[in-house]
Image (tube, rainbow, N blue to C red):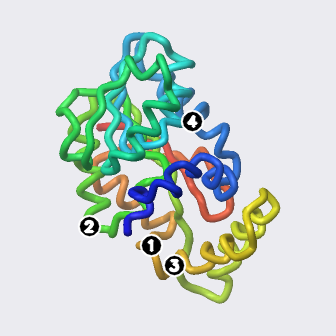
Amino acid sequence: MNVFSDRTAVSTYARNAARMVPGLSDLPKMAGALLAEYAPDDARILVLGAGGGLELKAFAEMQPGWRFDGVDPSADMLDLARTTLGPLASAVRWHEGYVDTAPSGPFDGATSLLTLHFLPRTQRLDTLKQLHARLKPGAPLVIVHHSFSDSGPGQDTWLKRNAAFSVASGMSPAQAGNILTLRERLPVLSPQQDIELIQEAGFADVDMFYCAFTFKGWVAYRR
């Protein structure tokens, strides 16, 4: 079963995500600040993986003039996003599906937070290329996801640290133990591989702005 189609998992998504992702409460505001460096006051922003609505809510509060297209494959997660946004949901056009269901744009910026680590390399590259094609020249892309080396004697060190953070944040040790198997369950790439993939998709000036245990975040710009 897709966890994002499980109603219990959906209803506890925000709480569990905050226990797993260090600094999650500030990530949407960081992404919004990076977008706002280039996006105008009436920007149109593409949000890939919009389910839950955490980043959409932050963006809409930060920039009342922005309008959004939110894309997510889970209808339940999109429903949660609508609830999270409340009256702010009127600023969003919703699309159930993947990046190929998004409008062609062109957009003034785009984000993909905590989504790309689910995609194997080929599909991830295609997604990045499709995001690139939907952006205006010079527009920023902000992405955050799991990114860590899968080789070497210390390969599990950061996973253990992530698990320790989750327990300290209120997650049960049994739940946090699932973090230790991420290498087997997700097609995770190393940070260098991720950067090379972003560049291969056509983006330039790739800069890391966020690093928290196994999570990394970059901003890059459409050539």
Contact (Cβ within 8 Å) of mark 3 with mark 4: no
Q: Say what amino acid the circle numbered 1 marks.
A: Leu
Between marks 1 and 2 in the image, the one whose residue lies nearer the viewer: 1
- Cα distance, mark 1 to mark 2? 14 Å
Label 1: which residue?
A: 186
Label 2 SS: helix
The residue labelled by disc 3 is: 183
Residue 122 image label: 2
Q: Are marks 1 and 3 in contact (CB under 8 Å)?
A: yes
Q: Is residue 98 visible?
A: yes
Judging from the image, what secondary structure is the residue with disc 4 in? Answer: helix
Relative placement, left or right, of 181 versus 24 is: left
Q: In the picture shown, does residue 214 fall above or below 76?
A: below
Label 2: how many residues lie within 10 Å, few (<14), some (14-19) or many (20+)?
Answer: few
Residue drawn at x 28%, y 43% is: 131
- Distance from disc 1 to disc 3, alpha carbons, whole Å, reads 6 Å
Residue kind at label 4, given as amino acid type:
Pro
Q: Is residue 43 left or right of residue 130?
A: right
Question: Secondary structure beneath disc 1?
Answer: loop
Circles 1 and 4, Cβ within 8 Å, touching? The answer is no
